Image: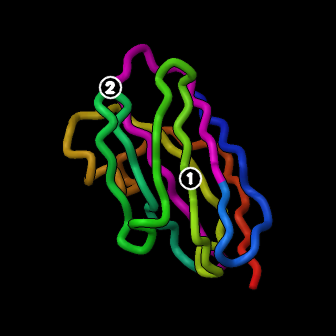
């Protein structure tokens, strides 16, 4: 399984960015993709996750209403659309993949993930 994250960059407070994660190697749609982030000096935290099979999603409270996760099974990509970005959203963002067994909310925790992509840096300036 391989994951390739892209789309990070520099944006002003209140701006938008769209991250994309290209996924390869799963033989079926029964997997979950999570987006995580790690800011300097902080622990990695779950941002959002989605079940590829049925599109079920879950979000961290800090991003609800601002971020939207979506998948395109035909293209094997999972996107994270981020709006109204705040300085505290500044971090390296990672996508990760895991076999999916249900209860999508559980997949906001990184312990469930076996496969990780490289990070993409999101910097939100004032």
Q: Residue at x 37, y 60 (%)?
A: 59
Q: Is residue 41 visible?
A: no
58 vs 103, nearest the viewer: 58
Q: Which mark is residue 81?
A: 1
Tag on residue 12?
none
Instruction: Examine the rendered structure and indicate whether residue 64 appears above or below residue 114.
Output: below
Q: Which residue is mark 2?
A: 30
- Expressed as whole percent of the image width and height from the top left, the position of residue 87 reads 65, 81
- Element assignment for label 2: loop
Query: Which residue of the protein is positioned furthest toward the bottom in this rendering?
Result: 126
Q: Indicate the position of residue 72 as horizontal and vertical percent values.
A: 50, 28
**Residue that lies at the very extreme toward the left in this rendered image:** 103
Quarter placement of the C terminus: bottom right
What residue occupies the far top of the structure in this picture? 27
Query: Which residue is at a point 57% across and 59% down the rendered structure image?
Result: 82
Q: Is residue 87 above or below residue 35?
A: below
Please tell me whether mark 1 or mark 2 is closer to you in this view. 1
**Residue segment shown in magenta:** 18-41
């Amino acid at each position: 399984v391989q994951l390739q994250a892209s789309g990070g960059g520099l944006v002003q407070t209140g701006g938008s960015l769209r991250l994309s994660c290209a996924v390869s190697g799963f033989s079926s749609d029964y997997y979950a993709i999570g987006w995580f982030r790690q800011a300097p000096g902080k622990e990695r935290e779950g941002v959002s996750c989605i079940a590829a099979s049925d599109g079920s999603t879950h979000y961290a409270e800090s991003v609800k209403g601002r971020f939207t996760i979506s998948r395109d099974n035909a293209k094997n990509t999972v996107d994270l659309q981020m709006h109204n970005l705040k300085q505290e959203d500044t971090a390296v963002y990672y996508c990760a993949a895991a076999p999916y067994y249900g209860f999508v909310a559980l997949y906001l925790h990184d312990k469930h993930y076996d496969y990780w992509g490289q990070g993409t840096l999101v910097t939100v300036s004032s």
